[in-house]
Image (spheres, helix red, strand yellow):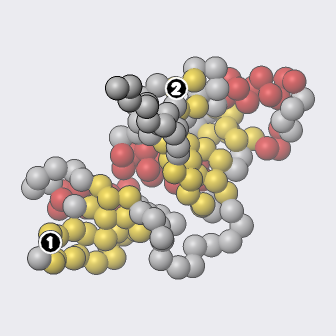
Amino acid sequence: MTSTPGPTPVHWKLVIDSADPHAQADFWSATLGYTVEDNSAFIEQLLGLGALPAEATVDFHGRRAFRDLIAVRHPDDPYDRDRGTGLGRRLLFQRVPEPKTVKNRLHLDLHPGEGRRADEVERLTTLGASVLRDVKEPAGAWVVMADPEGNEFCVH
C-alpha cells in the first residue's frame, strides 16, 4: 500500500500593521531575540536598476531600509543572503495610515520559561511595552501586555 504524501508545508510570515515599522522591528527584535532583517544590498541593487525610488527608503541604523516595511526573523532560521529576507519564523511590520482602534484578533503568546514571567514583564516594560492586566484563571496565569503601538500580547 502506498501512502500519499501530505501537502508541502507552506512558508508564512505574520504581518503586523504599524505606524512606525522600524520602531516596532526594534521593539520586537529585542523582545524575541530576533534579528532585524538587513535588506540593504537588495535595496541598493533595486536603486541601481531604477526599480525603486530613493524616497521609498530610509536610513535605519546606518543602512538603507524600505521606508514602509521591515521584518525581524529568528536568528537560527535560514535566510536569502542576497535579499536579506528570512525563510523561516518572521514578523513583518508594514506602515499603514490608520491607527489601531480595537482589540487584536490575533496575538503572540510569549513563554519565557518556568518562574521567569515577572522578570520578563519587567524587561518588556523597560523596552516600551505596557501591562494591560494580570490574568489568573483555573487554567493558568499570564500577563496581557501591549507593545509600543498598542498591539496586545501575552506573557505566560
The x, y position of residue 88, in whole percent, is 46, 34
Residue at 17% from the left image edge and 62% from the top image edge = 118
Secondary structure under tag 2 reads strand
Q: Considering only vertical position in the picture, is 67 above or below 150? A: above
Q: Considering only vertical position in the picture, is 11 above or below 109? A: above
Residue at 38% from the left image edge and 29% from the top image edge = 3
Report the quarter where the N terminus lies: top left
Secondary structure under tag 1 reads loop
Q: Which of marks 2 and 1 is nearer the N terminus?
A: 2
Residue 129 is at least partly visible in this image? no
Q: How many numbered tags mark residues here?
A: 2
Question: Viewed as shown, does residue 85 lie left or right of 35?
Answer: right
**Badge number at residue 79:** 2
Residue type at mark 2 is: Tyr
State the residue position of label 1: 139
The x, y position of residue 29, in whole percent, is 43, 44
- Closer-to-camera residue (105/39): 105
Q: Quadrant of residue 66?
A: top right
Q: Quadrant of residue 142?
A: bottom left
Residue 146 is at least partly visible in this image? yes
- Closer-to-camera residue (140/116): 140
The x, y position of residue 63, in whole percent, is 64, 31
**Badge number at residue 49:** none
